[in-house]
Image: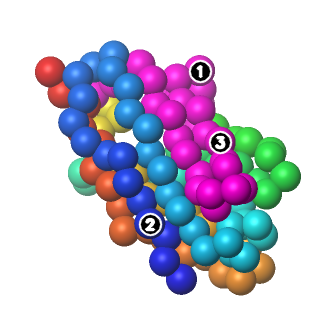
Amino acid sequence: VQLVESGGGTVQPGGSLRLSCAAPRDLFSLSRMGWYRQAPGKERELVAHITNVGVITYTESVKGRFTIFRDSAKNTVYMQMDSLKPEDTAVYYCNSASSWGNYWGQGTLVTVSS
Protein backbone atom coordinates (compact mmCIF):
# COMPACT_ATOMS: atom_id res chain seq x y z
CA VAL A 1 0.00 0.00 0.00
CA GLN A 2 1.41 3.39 -0.99
CA LEU A 3 0.43 6.73 0.43
CA VAL A 4 1.78 9.52 -1.78
CA GLU A 5 2.47 12.79 0.00
CA SER A 6 3.30 16.21 -1.36
CA GLY A 7 3.34 19.83 -0.30
CA GLY A 8 6.15 20.28 2.17
CA GLY A 9 8.70 23.05 1.94
CA THR A 10 10.17 26.08 3.64
CA VAL A 11 8.06 29.02 4.69
CA GLN A 12 8.48 32.08 6.89
CA PRO A 13 6.69 32.36 10.23
CA GLY A 14 3.08 33.33 9.64
CA GLY A 15 3.05 31.69 6.24
CA SER A 16 0.95 28.84 4.86
CA LEU A 17 1.43 25.46 3.28
CA ARG A 18 -0.95 22.74 2.14
CA LEU A 19 -0.03 19.07 2.45
CA SER A 20 -1.75 16.38 0.42
CA CYS A 21 -1.78 12.59 0.64
CA ALA A 22 -3.31 10.26 -1.95
CA ALA A 23 -4.31 6.71 -1.08
CA PRO A 24 -5.71 3.76 -3.03
CA ARG A 25 -9.45 4.22 -3.46
CA ASP A 26 -10.68 1.19 -1.53
CA LEU A 27 -8.36 1.89 1.38
CA PHE A 28 -9.26 5.58 1.45
CA SER A 29 -13.00 4.90 1.74
CA LEU A 30 -12.49 2.72 4.81
CA SER A 31 -9.82 4.69 6.59
CA ARG A 32 -9.36 7.30 9.20
CA MET A 33 -6.76 9.50 7.48
CA GLY A 34 -4.39 11.62 9.46
CA TRP A 35 -1.20 13.60 9.72
CA TYR A 36 1.52 13.05 12.27
CA ARG A 37 4.78 14.92 12.68
CA GLN A 38 8.19 14.29 14.12
CA ALA A 39 10.55 17.09 15.03
CA PRO A 40 14.29 16.45 15.54
CA GLY A 41 14.90 14.70 18.83
CA LYS A 42 11.19 14.27 19.56
CA GLU A 43 8.61 11.53 19.38
CA ARG A 44 6.18 11.32 16.49
CA GLU A 45 2.91 13.01 17.46
CA LEU A 46 -0.59 13.26 16.09
CA VAL A 47 -1.39 16.54 14.36
CA ALA A 48 -4.90 15.84 13.09
CA HIS A 49 -7.05 13.05 11.72
CA ILE A 50 -10.40 12.73 10.00
CA THR A 51 -12.56 9.60 9.91
CA ASN A 52 -14.29 8.28 6.83
CA VAL A 53 -17.49 9.93 8.08
CA GLY A 54 -15.84 13.26 8.74
CA VAL A 55 -15.15 13.27 12.46
CA ILE A 56 -12.06 15.42 13.05
CA THR A 57 -9.52 15.58 15.84
CA TYR A 58 -6.75 18.16 16.19
CA THR A 59 -3.91 18.33 18.63
CA GLU A 60 -4.29 21.39 20.83
CA SER A 61 -1.30 23.30 19.48
CA VAL A 62 -2.69 23.50 15.92
CA LYS A 63 -6.35 24.24 16.64
CA GLY A 64 -7.48 27.33 14.77
CA ARG A 65 -4.44 27.27 12.49
CA PHE A 66 -4.59 23.92 10.66
CA THR A 67 -7.52 22.45 8.76
CA ILE A 68 -7.76 18.83 7.68
CA PHE A 69 -10.19 17.75 4.99
CA ARG A 70 -10.67 14.89 2.58
CA ASP A 71 -11.80 14.68 -1.03
CA SER A 72 -13.37 11.30 -1.76
CA ALA A 73 -13.43 11.95 -5.51
CA LYS A 74 -9.62 12.22 -5.47
CA ASN A 75 -8.95 9.74 -2.64
CA THR A 76 -6.87 12.45 -1.05
CA VAL A 77 -6.57 13.98 2.38
CA TYR A 78 -5.29 17.51 2.77
CA MET A 79 -4.03 19.63 5.60
CA GLN A 80 -4.08 23.38 5.20
CA MET A 81 -1.55 24.91 7.56
CA ASP A 82 -1.85 28.63 8.25
CA SER A 83 -0.09 30.95 10.69
CA LEU A 84 2.86 28.59 10.76
CA LYS A 85 5.30 28.87 13.63
CA PRO A 86 8.93 27.75 13.95
CA GLU A 87 7.79 25.04 16.36
CA ASP A 88 5.76 23.49 13.53
CA THR A 89 9.02 22.52 11.85
CA ALA A 90 9.04 18.74 11.47
CA VAL A 91 8.72 15.86 9.05
CA TYR A 92 5.02 15.33 8.45
CA TYR A 93 3.71 11.83 7.81
CA CYS A 94 0.40 10.80 6.32
CA ASN A 95 -1.32 7.89 8.05
CA SER A 96 -4.13 5.57 7.06
CA ALA A 97 -5.80 3.52 9.81
CA SER A 98 -8.50 0.93 9.18
CA SER A 99 -9.35 -2.73 9.55
CA TRP A 100 -6.85 -3.29 6.72
CA GLY A 101 -4.03 -2.07 8.91
CA ASN A 102 -1.95 1.00 9.68
CA TYR A 103 0.00 2.58 6.79
CA TRP A 104 2.41 5.50 6.54
CA GLY A 105 3.60 7.85 3.86
CA GLN A 106 7.25 8.54 3.25
CA GLY A 107 7.18 11.88 5.07
CA THR A 108 7.50 15.43 3.85
CA LEU A 109 9.63 18.09 5.51
CA VAL A 110 8.08 21.35 6.66
CA THR A 111 10.50 24.05 7.75
CA VAL A 112 9.29 27.31 9.26
CA SER A 113 12.12 29.79 9.47
CA SER A 114 12.89 33.42 8.83
Q: Is label 2 in contact with label 1 (beta carbons under 8 Å)?
A: no
10 Å neighbourhood of mark 3: few (<14), some, or many (≥20)?
some
Instruction: Say which residue appears at 76% left-offset and 54% top-offset.
Output: 51
60 is within the stretch colored magenta? yes
Instruction: Give the structural element (helix, strand or loop) at label 1.
Output: loop
56 is within the stretch colored magenta? no
Task: Point out the residue furthest to the front here.
Answer: 73
Q: 74 or 100, which is in the foreground?
A: 74
Residue receiving disc 1: 64
Alpha carbon separation for disc pair 2 and 1: 26 Å
Which numbered disc, 3 or 1, marks the residue that appears first in the sequence?
Answer: 1
10 Å neighbourhood of mark 2: few (<14), some, or many (≥20)?
some
Image spot of residue 26 (x, y percent): 72, 76
What kind of residue is marked 2?
A: Val
96 sits to left or right of 53: left
97 sits to left or right of 16: right
- Residue 51 shows in this picture: yes
Residue receiving disc 3: 69
- Magenta-tinted stretch: 59-86
What kind of residue is marked 3?
A: Phe
Instruction: Say which residue appears at 66% left-offset and 81% top-offset.
Output: 101
- Residue 46 shows in this picture: no
Residue receiving disc 2: 4
Q: Is label 3 in contact with label 1 (beta carbons under 8 Å)?
A: no
Image spot of residue 106 (x, y percent): 37, 68
Instruction: Give the structural element (helix, strand or loop) at label 3.
Output: strand
10 Å neighbourhood of mark 1: few (<14), some, or many (≥20)?
few
Which numbered disc, 2 or 1, marks the residue that appears first in the sequence?
Answer: 2
Alpha carbon separation for disc pair 3 and 2: 16 Å
Which numbered disc, 3 or 2, marks the residue that appears first in the sequence?
Answer: 2
